Amino acid sequence: MADFCGSYPPNDPPSVGKDNSKLPEPVVMNFAMVEDRLVEALLTCWRTPDREQGWQQLRSAWPEITRDPLSGDYDARGGDGSSSDVPLRLASQTREEVAEMEEAFGWLSVLDADDRKLVGLAVAQLAAGKREISWVKMLRRMGLDHGADGLRMRYGRALAAIIAAQNRRKAGVSVSSG
């Protein structure tokens, strides 16, 4: 009987610390990074197809007609008889983008409902292409009649809470003990 014990890797734990240069340093999140990730997540969410609308437009599970590219019909991608006429369209999102979107939306769980609504409305303005958030226009959407500067400060505190939670998580400290 052969002894294969010498071929297994050692059971030593990996060395962690400043001596091991292979381990990446945890990235410390800041205000701009969190805001950019939330904007990217919202843009990805907007590109997601509406499944319910797709089902409502479905008339039958069978196609109404069968197109024949050899008799002059267009093929499925719109080319005139040849699929090479029209380049393939890329998918609206990749798995990585969807995973990043879900991760960024998961960050909002540290906020209460009112602050989530505030962050969502503010990020929606930025995702729509505005350079700055119009806090005065957001007052009515939040059900308020004054206090635009207070909304701006609440938004800053909400993002600071997200940043603190993410930095604690990346540093390996439990949120409940931090």
Image (cartoon, helix red, strand yellow):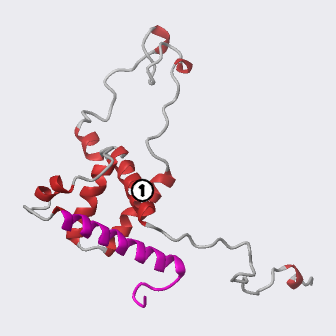
Position of residue 152 in the picture relative to residue 25 (left or right)? left
Looking at the picture, does residue 41 appear above or below residue 89?
below
Residue extending farthest right: 2
Residue occupying image coordinates x 22% and y 52%: 134
Foreground residue among 132 and 28: 132
Looking at the rendered structure, the kind of residue marked 1 is Asp
- Which residue sits furthest top? 71
Q: Which residues are magenta?
A: 149-178
Q: Nearer the viewer, residue 53 or 17?
A: 17
Q: Residue at x 24, y 56 (%)?
A: 121
Image x and y of residue 120, in percent = 27, 59
Quarter containing the C terminus = bottom left
In the image, 59: left or right of 72? left
Residue 145 sits above or below residue 56 on the image: below
Classified by dominant secondary structure, the portion drawn in magenta counts as helix
Secondary structure under tag 1 reads helix
| Left or right: 166 as drawn, with respect to 143 | right
Residue depicted at x 50% and y 11%: 70
Which residue extends farthest bottom?
177
Residue 147 in the image: state x and y as whole percent: 14, 65
Query: Are there few (<14), some (14-19), or many (20+) residues within 10 Å of tag 1?
Result: some
Q: Which residue is mark 1?
A: 36
Is 171 part of what is drawn in magenta? yes
| Residue at 73 percent of width and 84 percent of height | 15
Which quarter of the figure is the N terminus placed in? bottom right
Residue 99, compared with residue 111, is above or below; it is: above
Residue occupying the far front of the picture: 149
Instruction: Please name whichever residue, 118 or 54, is drawn nearer the observer in this view of the structure.
Output: 118
